[in-house]
Image: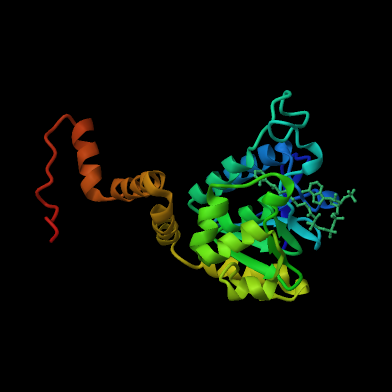
């Protein structure tokens, strides 16, 4: 794939090619642990990919083959969250905002995981629509070991994915699981040899790009709505309105208003 890099970032890489956007956490010296700056940049990059009408699928990954992401950077963890030169002395937990953004993004997001997906990095792959793992991938949570937890998507979306008993085990025990176990548990969609990871992920992305974007959007919204409660219904309702706006029936209402006449909805069927 002939990836085209764009944007000025410190902690991430943003690339596009053939209808795909690839967003890479680029802090391999810390196993791609994130700091607030990383998350400000990731949020901007995901927003770019969402707004770009050429992009139909987003691939989310980490630089190198040692880690997808090892969660919050413990070396810059302050007493009220994570602190760096962009936080003006106030600690942040802004990974939660990114999780919501990935869920709300109407385009499929594929986590491409080589090496560790640990702690908050594990939660990020759980929030993605699909996960393709290399055979060296390792999964797990560390919260109760390092003094942290994620009581949001990190716990109940994980439980929805692998079942309650396994989610409890993963969080309480803080063990690591290999790629085959993750596959058996339904935590990932496929496991491939490390050297084939990008090729396989791109293949999945290309297949998705052949599908109806609106159908994928509605399916993502529908599958999320059950877990996301009112917020999920809000998104799904917005999508339903979008589709209604695209109908002649809705456009008759708009046109009548603009033409200062009574709308004529008589030609539209009263569907059973
Ligand atoms: C991932 C793991 C198990 C890998 O172990 P190993 O032995 O293969 O590598 P090593 O030597 O630990 O890591 C390589 C370098 O990356 C740094 C390490 O410190 C080391 O650098 P040096 O110290 O040698 O210079 N590194 C790795 N992970 C880091 C991290 N998260 N922060 C800063 N530096 C990191 C092993 O590295 C590990 O257990 N890492 C920590 C995983 C972890 O506990 N993450 C935080 C969970 S809490 C969280 O993410 C969170 C949340 O729960 C809620 C809200 C927001 C965030």
The residue that appears at 20% across and 43% down in the rendered structure is: 252
Relative to 108, 30 lies left or right: right
Quick one: 195 or 246, which is closer to the camera? 195
Q: Is residue 250 visible?
A: yes
| Residue 79 image point, x, y percent | 73, 31
Q: Outermost residue toward the right?
A: 29
Q: Outermost residue toward the left?
A: 266
| Residue 164 image point, x, y percent | 51, 63
| Residue 9 image point, x, y percent | 75, 40
Quick one: 228 or 258, which is closer to the camera? 228
Quarter of the image where one finds residue 63: bottom right
* Number of marks in picture: 0
In the displayed structure, 120 sits above or below 134; it is above
Question: Looking at the figure, which quarter contains the C terminus?
Answer: bottom left
Q: Is residue 54 visible?
A: no
| Residue 262 image point, x, y percent | 11, 35
In the displayed structure, 171 sits above or below 260; it is below
Relative to 8, 254 lies left or right: left
In the displayed structure, 23 sits above or below 160; it is above
Q: How is the image coloured?
A: rainbow
């Amino acid at each position: 794939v002939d990836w085209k890099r764009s944007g000025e970032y410190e902690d991430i890489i943003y690339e596009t090619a053939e209808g795909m956007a690839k967003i890479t956490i680029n802090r391999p010296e810390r196993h791609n642990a994130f700091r607030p700056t990383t998350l400000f940049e990731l949020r901007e990059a995901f927003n770019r990919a969402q707004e770009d009408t050429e992009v139909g699928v987003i691939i989310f990954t980490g630089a190198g083959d040692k880690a997808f992401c090892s969660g919050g950077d413990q070396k810059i963890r302050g007493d009220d969250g994570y602190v760096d030169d962009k936080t003006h002395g106030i600690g942040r937990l802004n990974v939660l905002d990114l999780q919501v953004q990935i869920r709300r993004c109407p385009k499929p997001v594929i986590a491409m995981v080589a090496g560790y997906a640990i702690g908050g990095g594990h939660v990020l792959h759980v929030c993605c629509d699909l996960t393709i793992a290399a055979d060296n991938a390792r999964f797990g949570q560390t919260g109760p070991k390092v003094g942290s937890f994620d009581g949001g998507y990190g716990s109940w979306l994980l439980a929805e994915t692998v079942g309650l008993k396994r989610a409890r085990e993963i969080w309480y025990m803080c063990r690591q699981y290999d790629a085959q176990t993750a596959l058996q548990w339904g935590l990932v969609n496929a496991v491939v040899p490390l050297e084939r990871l990008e090729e396989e992920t791109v293949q999945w992305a290309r297949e998705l790009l052949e599908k109806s974007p609106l159908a994928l959007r509605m399916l993502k919204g529908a599958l999320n709505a059950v877990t996301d409660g009112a917020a999920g219904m809000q998104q799904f309702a917005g999508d339903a309105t979008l589709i209604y706006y695209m109908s002649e029936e809705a456009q008759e209402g708009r046109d009548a208003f603009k033409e200062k006449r009574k709308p004529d909805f008589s030609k539209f069927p009263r569907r059973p």
